[in-house]
């Protein structure tokens, strides 16, 4: 179980970074903020605590897949801006 958790965390860490960048971006789509909020509410739903087995399956499978799908719907210009942000090297003073 612990290995599965770390696998999912490593796979979704880049998606979480992209989501954070997109939420702070000035040209983000209007649907992104409510969709991210609904996904966060779904991730901490009471079902996770009432039925632990379903909660684990939910958190390990459905939430990362929904996050990845949400980010696939972002405009290409925002994805390019994110990839260029990583490519830019800032020289120290």
Image (cartoon, helix red, strand yellow):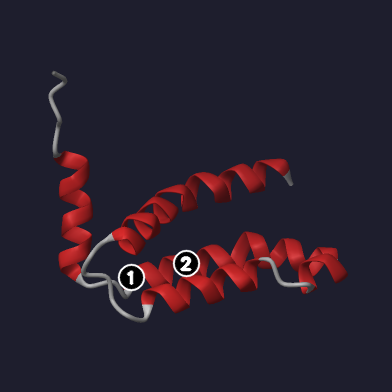
Q: Residue furthest top?
A: 93
The reply, left or right, for residue 45 in relation to residue 20 is: right
Please give the name of the residue rendered at 19% of the width and 46% of the height, measured from the top-left corner: 85
**Quarter of the view holding residue 55:** bottom right
Q: Residue at x 55, y 72 (%)?
A: 39
Quarter of the image with the C terminus in it: top left
- Is 58 situated left or right of 47 in this image? left
- Quarter of the view holding residue 71: bottom left
Classify mark 1: helix, strand or loop.
Answer: helix
Position of 30 relative to 2 (above/below): below
Of all residues shown, which one is farthest toward the right? Answer: 50
Which residue is at 71% across, 42% downward? 2
> Residue 75: x percent and y percent?
22, 72
Q: Nearer the viewer, residue 9 or 31?
A: 31
Please state which of residues 91 and 84 is positioned toward the viewer in this rendering. Answer: 91
Q: Is residue 63 left or right of residue 2?
A: left
Residue 24 in the image: state x and y as whole percent. 32, 59
How packed mark 2 is, by other alpha carbons closer than 10 Å (few <14, some 14-19, many 20 or more), is: some
Q: Position of residue 87 (x, y in %)?
A: 16, 40
Could you say which disc has been placed on residue 72 in the image?
1
Q: In this figure, what is the number of numbered marks? A: 2
- Label 1: how many residues lie within 10 Å, few (<14), some (14-19) or many (20+)? few
- Of residues 72 and 18, the one drawn nearer to the viewer in this rendering: 18
Can you identify the residue that label 2 sits on?
67
């Amino acid at each position: 179980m612990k290995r599965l958790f770390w696998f999912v965390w490593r796979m979704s860490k880049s998606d979480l970074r992209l989501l954070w960048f997109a939420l702070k971006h000035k040209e983000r789509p209007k649907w992104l903020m409510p969709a991210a909020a609904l996904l966060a509410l779904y991730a901490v739903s009471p079902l996770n605590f009432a039925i632990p087995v379903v909660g684990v399956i939910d958190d390990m499978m459905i939430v990362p897949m929904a996050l990845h799908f949400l980010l696939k719907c972002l405009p290409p210009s925002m994805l390019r801006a994110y990839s260029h942000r990583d490519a830019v090297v800032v020289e120290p003073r």
